[in-house]
Image (spheres, grey):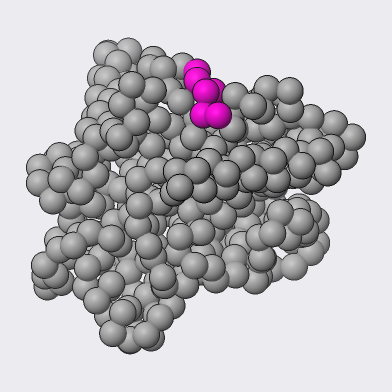
Amino acid sequence: MGLLYFWRDKLMEHMEFLEQLNTYSIKFLRLQFVDVAGNLKNVAVTSENVGEVLKKEMTFIHNGEKVLFEPDLESLTVLPWRPREGAVGRIYGNLLLPNDEQKIICPRKFFTRFNLPLEVAVEFSFYLQEKVQEKTPVDHAGLWDVSPLDLGENLRRDVVLTLEKMGIGVKYSGHGAHPGEQVLGLKPVKGNKLPDILTTAKFVVRTIAERHGLNASFFPYHHKKPGLSVKYTFLGEKEETEKLYQKIVTLLPEAEIIFRPLINDYYGYPQKPENFIFYDGDHIVLTVSPKANPYLVLSLLAIETNVNAQNPVLAADFGQALRRFSESTKLREFFGELFWRYLKIKQKSYFDFWSRVHEEGDNGD
């Protein structure tokens, strides 16, 4: 009987989903997922082919291997900037290997295994740049400046309104400290929901910027100064937050390349734990690179480890952070297959960087 109830519930869930597609006149459905590095990807299908998605039969090639899309039907959202007639919907999902669904290759799938009861607020920033002159900031305003110095007001307004239509609350917005820098602070949510929300918010920012004829950059290093960041604020009881703080500080040396995944993240930043994590006995603020994969960052909070939060020494550069990560038995056992995939990506980045350096040196001779 249990199996019968399971399939009955599945059928009802599928019927409700199809009814939603019809109610919102959704013609195209974007199947969105996040790769190991944290980049948002998608495959679009028409409403006529949604049956394959519901039956978990939608396969495609990603990074040279055949993958299966596992839909999260509760994540359905209509993209509000697209026409209402023949509307475009979006759902998140996870990637599986068709012949080995138990092997976890998707950071989002990995993250869903854990329960994070703490509420988390997040603040993130991005640069608005002119499209014609690449990397030219849209203005030269400073922290919390107003118009006419601040030329990002209208765009931020459109972003906030769009996010609210998609069910994402914004607590505040304004101009950042650097030329063209914009800041958004999202309302606190349960930790389990945050990675999807942050990923969606970045997607909306890029889309709205494009519609304004501008480019939104999340590259962490700009104007020859350390700039952009994502700040996670963890809220909870003192006992909870104190344990979490000790855990994060203990993990920092081994997991630093998850918090700071790019070579540029190590330029100009003081190598001190207090620059990344702040704790006042009430809440924790964790500052990471805007390119850090939020699913991996928050998954780290679920590691069972003996805390040793005594003066951790952080990496001097990307290479040292990479070596520490590669030698971590703790992280290798925790992440499993994802560990090796993430390591491979970072090793390639490091190799490509030094290859370019040597090529430029040879050309200079």
Does residue 111 sit above or below 37 in this rendering?
A: below
Name the residue furthest front: 1
Q: Could you say which is closer to the camera, residue 58 or residue 197?
A: 58
Please name the residue shown 60% across and 61% down the image.
Answer: 183
Q: Could you say which is closer to the camera, residue 219 or residue 40?
A: 40
Please name the residue shown 63% across and 57% down the image.
Answer: 182
Give x and y (percent) for residue 328: 12, 46
How many numbered circles does the render carry? Answer: 0
Residue 98 part of the magenta segment: no
Give x and y (percent) for residue 275: 32, 66
* Residue 196 left/right relative to 44: left
Please name the residue shown 55% across and 29% down the image.
Answer: 55
* Residue 95 picture quarter: top left
* Residue 345 picture quarter: top left
Q: Could you say which is closer to the camera, residue 283 or residue 10?
A: 10
Magenta-colored segment: predominant secondary structure: loop
Residue 56 part of the magenta segment: yes
* Residue 365 picture quarter: top left
Q: Is residue 357 visible?
A: no
The segment highlighted magenta reads 55-60
Give x and y (percent) for residue 105: 34, 33
